[in-house]
Image (cartoon, helix red, strand yellow):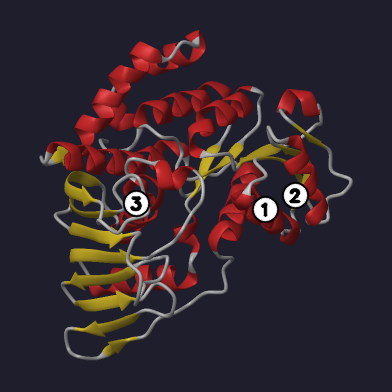
Amino acid sequence: MPDLLRLLQVGAGGMGRAWLRTIADNPDVDLVGLIDLDVPLARAAADEHGYGEVPVAASIEELGVDADAVIDVTVPVAHPTVSVDALLRGLPVLCEKPLAATVRECLAMVAASEVSGKLLMVSQSRRYFRAGNAFGRQLAELGRIGSLSCEFFKAPHFSGFRERMAEPLLVDMAIHQFDLSRKLIGSEPVSVYCESYNPDWSWFDGNAGASAIFRFADGTRFSFTGSWCAPGLETSWNGRWRASASGGTATWDGDNAPVAELASGEALPATLLEDPEQIAGSLVEFVDAVRESTIPQSEVHSNVVSVAMVEAAVRSASTGEVVRVADVLEAAYEEALATVQDPTLHAALKAWPNVLKVVGLES
Protein backbone atom coordinates (compact mmCIF):
# COMPACT_ATOMS: atom_id res chain seq x y z
CA MET A 1 0.00 0.00 0.00
CA PRO A 2 1.51 3.38 -0.99
CA ASP A 3 2.36 5.97 1.64
CA LEU A 4 -0.16 8.69 2.34
CA LEU A 5 0.31 11.78 0.18
CA ARG A 6 1.28 14.58 2.57
CA LEU A 7 -0.65 17.74 1.77
CA LEU A 8 -0.23 21.40 2.59
CA GLN A 9 -3.41 23.42 2.18
CA VAL A 10 -3.14 27.15 1.50
CA GLY A 11 -6.38 28.99 2.27
CA ALA A 12 -8.71 28.54 5.25
CA GLY A 13 -11.79 30.51 4.19
CA GLY A 14 -15.18 29.13 3.19
CA MET A 15 -13.92 27.01 0.30
CA GLY A 16 -10.87 26.08 2.35
CA ARG A 17 -13.11 24.52 4.96
CA ALA A 18 -14.84 22.45 2.28
CA TRP A 19 -11.43 21.18 1.24
CA LEU A 20 -10.52 20.34 4.83
CA ARG A 21 -13.59 18.10 5.00
CA THR A 22 -12.71 16.51 1.66
CA ILE A 23 -9.13 15.82 2.73
CA ALA A 24 -10.37 14.28 5.98
CA ASP A 25 -12.62 11.90 4.02
CA ASN A 26 -9.87 10.71 1.65
CA PRO A 27 -7.92 7.70 2.99
CA ASP A 28 -4.94 8.29 0.68
CA VAL A 29 -3.87 11.72 1.94
CA ASP A 30 -2.68 13.33 5.16
CA LEU A 31 -2.90 17.04 5.97
CA VAL A 32 0.45 18.14 7.40
CA GLY A 33 -0.05 21.92 7.43
CA LEU A 34 -2.61 24.68 6.93
CA ILE A 35 -1.55 28.11 5.70
CA ASP A 36 -3.44 31.40 5.67
CA LEU A 37 -2.43 35.03 6.02
CA ASP A 38 -4.96 35.11 8.86
CA VAL A 39 -3.22 32.62 11.15
CA PRO A 40 -5.93 32.65 13.87
CA LEU A 41 -8.49 31.83 11.16
CA ALA A 42 -6.33 28.90 10.04
CA ARG A 43 -5.98 27.65 13.60
CA ALA A 44 -9.73 27.83 14.16
CA ALA A 45 -10.49 26.05 10.87
CA ALA A 46 -7.99 23.28 11.62
CA ASP A 47 -9.35 22.76 15.12
CA GLU A 48 -12.97 22.70 13.93
CA HIS A 49 -12.20 19.93 11.43
CA GLY A 50 -10.28 17.63 13.76
CA TYR A 51 -6.80 18.85 12.86
CA GLY A 52 -5.83 20.16 16.28
CA GLU A 53 -2.29 18.76 15.95
CA VAL A 54 -1.71 20.14 12.45
CA PRO A 55 0.58 23.20 12.43
CA VAL A 56 -0.61 26.48 10.91
CA ALA A 57 1.33 29.46 9.59
CA ALA A 58 1.17 32.43 7.24
CA SER A 59 3.43 30.93 4.54
CA ILE A 60 4.98 27.69 3.34
CA GLU A 61 8.40 28.97 4.33
CA GLU A 62 7.28 29.87 7.83
CA LEU A 63 5.57 26.51 8.31
CA GLY A 64 8.72 24.57 7.50
CA VAL A 65 7.24 21.06 7.24
CA ASP A 66 7.90 18.33 4.68
CA ALA A 67 5.09 17.75 2.20
CA ASP A 68 4.40 16.00 -1.09
CA ALA A 69 1.88 18.40 -2.65
CA VAL A 70 -0.08 21.63 -2.17
CA ILE A 71 -3.80 22.42 -2.39
CA ASP A 72 -4.23 26.10 -3.35
CA VAL A 73 -7.60 27.32 -2.07
CA THR A 74 -6.73 31.01 -1.89
CA VAL A 75 -8.73 33.77 -3.61
CA PRO A 76 -8.23 33.74 -7.41
CA VAL A 77 -5.94 36.80 -7.50
CA ALA A 78 -3.51 34.97 -5.21
CA HIS A 79 -3.32 31.77 -7.26
CA PRO A 80 -0.38 32.82 -9.47
CA THR A 81 1.77 33.73 -6.46
CA VAL A 82 0.83 30.75 -4.27
CA SER A 83 0.86 28.06 -6.95
CA VAL A 84 4.03 29.25 -8.68
CA ASP A 85 5.86 29.45 -5.35
CA ALA A 86 4.84 25.87 -4.52
CA LEU A 87 5.80 24.58 -7.97
CA LEU A 88 9.24 26.19 -7.80
CA ARG A 89 9.70 24.57 -4.39
CA GLY A 90 9.26 21.24 -6.16
CA LEU A 91 5.69 20.56 -5.05
CA PRO A 92 2.85 19.52 -7.38
CA VAL A 93 -0.24 21.70 -6.97
CA LEU A 94 -4.00 21.22 -7.13
CA CYS A 95 -5.42 24.72 -7.57
CA GLU A 96 -9.02 25.80 -7.12
CA LYS A 97 -10.73 27.34 -10.13
CA PRO A 98 -10.32 29.76 -11.78
CA LEU A 99 -6.63 29.17 -12.39
CA ALA A 100 -5.96 32.93 -12.45
CA ALA A 101 -7.68 36.21 -13.17
CA THR A 102 -6.06 36.59 -16.60
CA VAL A 103 -4.81 34.32 -19.36
CA ARG A 104 -1.48 36.14 -19.16
CA GLU A 105 -1.02 34.94 -15.58
CA CYS A 106 -2.18 31.44 -16.54
CA LEU A 107 0.56 31.20 -19.16
CA ALA A 108 3.19 32.13 -16.57
CA MET A 109 1.80 29.32 -14.40
CA VAL A 110 2.14 26.92 -17.33
CA ALA A 111 5.78 27.98 -17.62
CA ALA A 112 6.30 27.37 -13.89
CA SER A 113 4.90 23.85 -14.23
CA GLU A 114 7.24 23.17 -17.15
CA VAL A 115 10.32 24.64 -15.45
CA SER A 116 9.70 22.74 -12.21
CA GLY A 117 8.65 19.54 -13.90
CA LYS A 118 5.76 19.36 -11.42
CA LEU A 119 2.05 18.87 -12.03
CA LEU A 120 -0.31 21.84 -11.84
CA MET A 121 -3.93 20.69 -12.00
CA VAL A 122 -7.05 22.83 -11.67
CA SER A 123 -10.04 21.60 -9.68
CA GLN A 124 -12.94 21.93 -12.13
CA SER A 125 -15.45 20.21 -9.89
CA ARG A 126 -18.29 20.08 -12.45
CA ARG A 127 -16.31 17.47 -14.36
CA TYR A 128 -16.92 15.06 -11.49
CA PHE A 129 -20.70 14.91 -11.21
CA ARG A 130 -21.99 11.38 -11.84
CA ALA A 131 -25.10 12.62 -13.61
CA GLY A 132 -23.09 15.05 -15.70
CA ASN A 133 -20.75 12.30 -16.82
CA ALA A 134 -23.75 10.10 -17.61
CA PHE A 135 -25.03 12.97 -19.76
CA GLY A 136 -21.69 13.02 -21.56
CA ARG A 137 -21.87 9.29 -22.25
CA GLN A 138 -25.35 9.71 -23.70
CA LEU A 139 -24.08 12.45 -26.02
CA ALA A 140 -21.32 10.16 -27.23
CA GLU A 141 -23.97 7.61 -28.22
CA LEU A 142 -26.20 10.20 -29.91
CA GLY A 143 -23.60 11.11 -32.52
CA ARG A 144 -22.40 14.48 -33.69
CA ILE A 145 -23.68 17.39 -31.58
CA GLY A 146 -25.22 20.31 -33.42
CA SER A 147 -26.05 22.51 -30.46
CA LEU A 148 -25.44 22.42 -26.73
CA SER A 149 -27.07 24.90 -24.36
CA CYS A 150 -26.88 25.72 -20.68
CA GLU A 151 -29.25 27.93 -18.70
CA PHE A 152 -28.06 29.11 -15.29
CA PHE A 153 -30.31 31.20 -13.05
CA LYS A 154 -29.60 31.66 -9.35
CA ALA A 155 -29.95 34.43 -6.76
CA PRO A 156 -27.08 34.06 -4.27
CA HIS A 157 -26.13 36.78 -1.81
CA PHE A 158 -22.39 36.48 -1.39
CA SER A 159 -20.23 38.55 0.86
CA GLY A 160 -16.77 39.58 -0.23
CA PHE A 161 -15.03 39.85 -3.57
CA ARG A 162 -17.75 38.40 -5.85
CA GLU A 163 -20.19 41.25 -5.24
CA ARG A 164 -17.47 43.76 -6.18
CA MET A 165 -16.27 42.12 -9.41
CA ALA A 166 -16.85 43.80 -12.78
CA GLU A 167 -18.07 40.55 -14.39
CA PRO A 168 -18.94 38.22 -11.49
CA LEU A 169 -21.07 35.72 -13.42
CA LEU A 170 -18.69 35.31 -16.35
CA VAL A 171 -15.45 35.32 -14.40
CA ASP A 172 -16.31 33.48 -11.21
CA MET A 173 -19.15 31.15 -12.25
CA ALA A 174 -19.31 30.58 -16.01
CA ILE A 175 -15.83 29.04 -16.00
CA HIS A 176 -17.59 25.89 -14.74
CA GLN A 177 -20.06 25.70 -17.61
CA PHE A 178 -17.57 26.85 -20.24
CA ASP A 179 -15.08 24.21 -19.15
CA LEU A 180 -17.73 21.48 -19.01
CA SER A 181 -18.86 22.35 -22.55
CA ARG A 182 -15.38 21.41 -23.81
CA LYS A 183 -15.60 18.01 -22.14
CA LEU A 184 -19.14 17.33 -23.37
CA ILE A 185 -18.54 18.42 -26.97
CA GLY A 186 -15.09 16.87 -27.28
CA SER A 187 -13.81 19.76 -29.35
CA GLU A 188 -12.21 23.15 -28.72
CA PRO A 189 -13.72 26.66 -28.88
CA VAL A 190 -12.95 28.94 -31.82
CA SER A 191 -14.89 32.16 -31.16
CA VAL A 192 -17.57 33.75 -29.01
CA TYR A 193 -20.13 36.54 -29.08
CA CYS A 194 -21.31 37.67 -25.66
CA GLU A 195 -23.44 40.34 -24.02
CA SER A 196 -23.38 41.00 -20.27
CA TYR A 197 -25.63 43.23 -18.21
CA ASN A 198 -26.75 44.03 -14.68
CA PRO A 199 -30.49 44.10 -13.82
CA ASP A 200 -31.59 47.25 -12.05
CA TRP A 201 -32.55 45.17 -8.98
CA SER A 202 -29.07 43.63 -8.81
CA TRP A 203 -27.12 43.58 -5.54
CA PHE A 204 -23.86 43.12 -7.47
CA ASP A 205 -21.64 46.06 -8.45
CA GLY A 206 -20.78 44.45 -11.79
CA ASN A 207 -22.65 42.54 -14.48
CA ALA A 208 -24.55 39.66 -12.89
CA GLY A 209 -26.17 38.47 -16.14
CA ALA A 210 -24.77 37.31 -19.48
CA SER A 211 -25.55 35.45 -22.70
CA ALA A 212 -22.84 33.95 -24.89
CA ILE A 213 -22.65 31.73 -27.96
CA PHE A 214 -19.45 29.86 -28.78
CA ARG A 215 -18.48 28.26 -32.08
CA PHE A 216 -16.40 25.11 -31.70
CA ALA A 217 -13.85 23.69 -34.13
CA ASP A 218 -16.17 20.80 -35.10
CA GLY A 219 -19.00 23.20 -35.91
CA THR A 220 -20.96 22.74 -32.68
CA ARG A 221 -22.56 25.82 -31.15
CA PHE A 222 -22.61 26.16 -27.37
CA SER A 223 -24.92 28.77 -25.91
CA PHE A 224 -24.86 29.94 -22.31
CA THR A 225 -27.35 32.29 -20.70
CA GLY A 226 -27.59 33.07 -17.03
CA SER A 227 -27.99 35.44 -14.13
CA TRP A 228 -26.99 35.67 -10.49
CA CYS A 229 -29.98 37.95 -9.82
CA ALA A 230 -32.78 35.54 -10.73
CA PRO A 231 -34.93 34.76 -7.67
CA GLY A 232 -37.66 32.16 -8.14
CA LEU A 233 -37.66 28.88 -10.09
CA GLU A 234 -33.89 28.72 -9.82
CA THR A 235 -31.85 26.20 -11.78
CA SER A 236 -29.30 23.83 -10.34
CA TRP A 237 -25.86 25.26 -9.57
CA ASN A 238 -24.76 23.09 -12.49
CA GLY A 239 -27.25 24.75 -14.82
CA ARG A 240 -29.91 23.19 -17.03
CA TRP A 241 -28.49 21.53 -20.17
CA ARG A 242 -29.86 20.40 -23.55
CA ALA A 243 -28.03 18.88 -26.50
CA SER A 244 -29.32 18.26 -30.00
CA ALA A 245 -27.35 15.60 -31.89
CA SER A 246 -27.61 13.67 -35.13
CA GLY A 247 -29.11 10.67 -33.37
CA GLY A 248 -31.42 12.36 -30.88
CA THR A 249 -31.64 14.75 -27.96
CA ALA A 250 -30.49 14.67 -24.33
CA THR A 251 -31.32 16.93 -21.39
CA TRP A 252 -29.87 17.27 -17.89
CA ASP A 253 -31.42 19.36 -15.14
CA GLY A 254 -28.06 19.63 -13.38
CA ASP A 255 -28.99 17.48 -10.40
CA ASN A 256 -30.75 14.28 -11.41
CA ALA A 257 -30.11 11.57 -13.98
CA PRO A 258 -30.15 12.92 -17.55
CA VAL A 259 -32.88 12.01 -20.01
CA ALA A 260 -32.22 11.15 -23.66
CA GLU A 261 -34.35 10.13 -26.61
CA LEU A 262 -33.15 8.61 -29.86
CA ALA A 263 -34.39 9.88 -33.22
CA SER A 264 -36.59 6.77 -33.33
CA GLY A 265 -38.39 7.92 -30.17
CA GLU A 266 -36.79 5.19 -28.07
CA ALA A 267 -35.39 6.22 -24.67
CA LEU A 268 -31.63 6.06 -24.16
CA PRO A 269 -30.98 5.01 -20.56
CA ALA A 270 -28.52 6.89 -18.36
CA THR A 271 -25.74 4.99 -16.59
CA LEU A 272 -24.45 6.58 -13.39
CA LEU A 273 -21.18 5.22 -12.06
CA GLU A 274 -20.19 5.22 -8.38
CA ASP A 275 -17.32 7.65 -8.84
CA PRO A 276 -16.34 10.32 -6.29
CA GLU A 277 -18.03 13.63 -7.02
CA GLN A 278 -17.15 17.33 -7.03
CA ILE A 279 -13.93 18.32 -5.27
CA ALA A 280 -13.59 14.80 -3.87
CA GLY A 281 -13.29 13.62 -7.47
CA SER A 282 -10.69 16.29 -8.19
CA LEU A 283 -8.62 15.16 -5.21
CA VAL A 284 -8.78 11.48 -6.16
CA GLU A 285 -7.63 12.21 -9.71
CA PHE A 286 -4.86 14.52 -8.45
CA VAL A 287 -3.51 11.90 -6.04
CA ASP A 288 -3.54 9.25 -8.78
CA ALA A 289 -1.79 11.60 -11.22
CA VAL A 290 0.95 12.48 -8.72
CA ARG A 291 1.55 8.85 -7.84
CA GLU A 292 1.36 7.47 -11.38
CA SER A 293 2.82 10.47 -13.28
CA THR A 294 -0.25 10.59 -15.51
CA ILE A 295 -1.92 13.64 -17.07
CA PRO A 296 -5.26 14.38 -15.38
CA GLN A 297 -8.29 16.29 -16.60
CA SER A 298 -7.74 20.04 -16.22
CA GLU A 299 -3.96 19.82 -16.30
CA VAL A 300 -2.77 23.41 -16.58
CA HIS A 301 -1.92 23.42 -20.32
CA SER A 302 -5.47 22.39 -21.23
CA ASN A 303 -7.24 24.41 -18.56
CA VAL A 304 -5.83 27.66 -19.93
CA VAL A 305 -8.27 27.25 -22.84
CA SER A 306 -11.24 27.37 -20.45
CA VAL A 307 -9.91 30.57 -18.90
CA ALA A 308 -9.40 31.97 -22.41
CA MET A 309 -13.09 31.25 -23.12
CA VAL A 310 -14.00 33.46 -20.16
CA GLU A 311 -11.62 36.23 -21.18
CA ALA A 312 -12.89 36.08 -24.77
CA ALA A 313 -16.49 36.34 -23.55
CA VAL A 314 -15.65 39.33 -21.35
CA ARG A 315 -13.84 41.02 -24.26
CA SER A 316 -16.78 40.37 -26.57
CA ALA A 317 -19.20 41.82 -24.01
CA SER A 318 -16.99 44.91 -23.76
CA THR A 319 -16.48 45.46 -27.50
CA GLY A 320 -19.74 44.12 -28.92
CA GLU A 321 -17.75 42.03 -31.40
CA VAL A 322 -17.12 38.34 -32.03
CA VAL A 323 -13.80 37.43 -30.39
CA ARG A 324 -11.52 34.57 -31.44
CA VAL A 325 -10.15 32.46 -28.59
CA ALA A 326 -6.83 32.16 -30.43
CA ASP A 327 -6.52 35.95 -30.53
CA VAL A 328 -6.97 36.10 -26.75
CA LEU A 329 -4.27 33.48 -26.23
CA GLU A 330 -1.81 35.10 -28.62
CA ALA A 331 -2.30 38.54 -27.08
CA ALA A 332 -1.91 37.09 -23.58
CA TYR A 333 1.31 35.39 -24.64
CA GLU A 334 2.81 38.69 -25.81
CA GLU A 335 1.70 40.30 -22.54
CA ALA A 336 3.35 37.49 -20.57
CA LEU A 337 6.61 37.93 -22.46
CA ALA A 338 6.51 41.64 -21.67
CA THR A 339 5.63 41.34 -17.98
CA VAL A 340 7.05 38.12 -16.51
CA GLN A 341 10.14 39.14 -14.57
CA ASP A 342 11.44 35.79 -13.34
CA PRO A 343 14.25 35.02 -15.82
CA THR A 344 13.68 31.27 -15.73
CA LEU A 345 9.96 31.56 -16.42
CA HIS A 346 10.56 34.18 -19.11
CA ALA A 347 13.06 31.91 -20.85
CA ALA A 348 10.56 29.05 -20.76
CA LEU A 349 7.86 31.24 -22.30
CA LYS A 350 10.21 32.54 -24.98
CA ALA A 351 11.17 28.99 -25.96
CA TRP A 352 7.60 28.09 -26.90
CA PRO A 353 7.27 27.64 -30.67
CA ASN A 354 3.58 28.59 -30.69
CA VAL A 355 1.27 29.28 -27.74
CA LEU A 356 -1.66 27.63 -29.52
CA LYS A 357 0.30 24.39 -29.81
CA VAL A 358 1.38 24.60 -26.17
CA VAL A 359 -2.23 24.70 -24.94
CA GLY A 360 -3.49 22.14 -27.45
CA LEU A 361 -5.48 24.31 -29.87
CA GLU A 362 -3.13 23.41 -32.72
CA SER A 363 -1.42 20.10 -33.38
| Residue at 41% from the left image edge and 42% from the top image edge | 164
Q: Locate residue 327, reporting x and y percent.
A: 20, 31
Q: Quadrant of residue 139?
A: bottom left
| Residue at 69% from the left image edge and 36% from the top image edge | 36
Looking at marks 3 and 1 on the same chain, the residue that comes earlier in the sequence is marked by 1
Q: Locate residue 310, reporting x and y percent.
A: 30, 43
Position of 118 with respect to 306 (left or right) is right
Q: Locate residue 35, reporting x and y percent.
A: 72, 36
Where is mark 1, residue-wise?
17
Where is mark 2, residue-wise?
45
The single residue placed furthest to the left in the displayed view is 321
| Residue at 31% from the left image edge and 22% from the top image edge | 333
Give the spatial CA distance, label 3 vs label 1.
Answer: 23 Å
Q: Locate residue 269, reporting x and y percent.
A: 37, 85
The amino acid beneath tag 1 is Arg
Where is mark 3, residue-wise?
169
Mark 1 vs 2: CB contact within 8 A: yes
The amino acid beneath tag 3 is Leu
Query: Residue 37, can we see it?
Result: yes
The tag on residue 261 is none
Residue toward you, 95 or 143: 95
Q: Quadrant of residue 26?
A: bottom right
Looking at marks 2 and 3 on the same chain, the residue that comes earlier in the sequence is marked by 2
Circle 2 SS class = helix
Please tell me whether residue 107 is drawn above or below residue 141 in the rendered image: above
Circle 3 SS class = helix
Q: Residues within 10 Å of mark 3 (few under 14, many from 20)?
A: many
Position of 213 with respect to 69 (left or right) is left
The amino acid beneath tag 2 is Ala
Circle 1 SS class = helix
Residue toward you, 357 or 74: 74
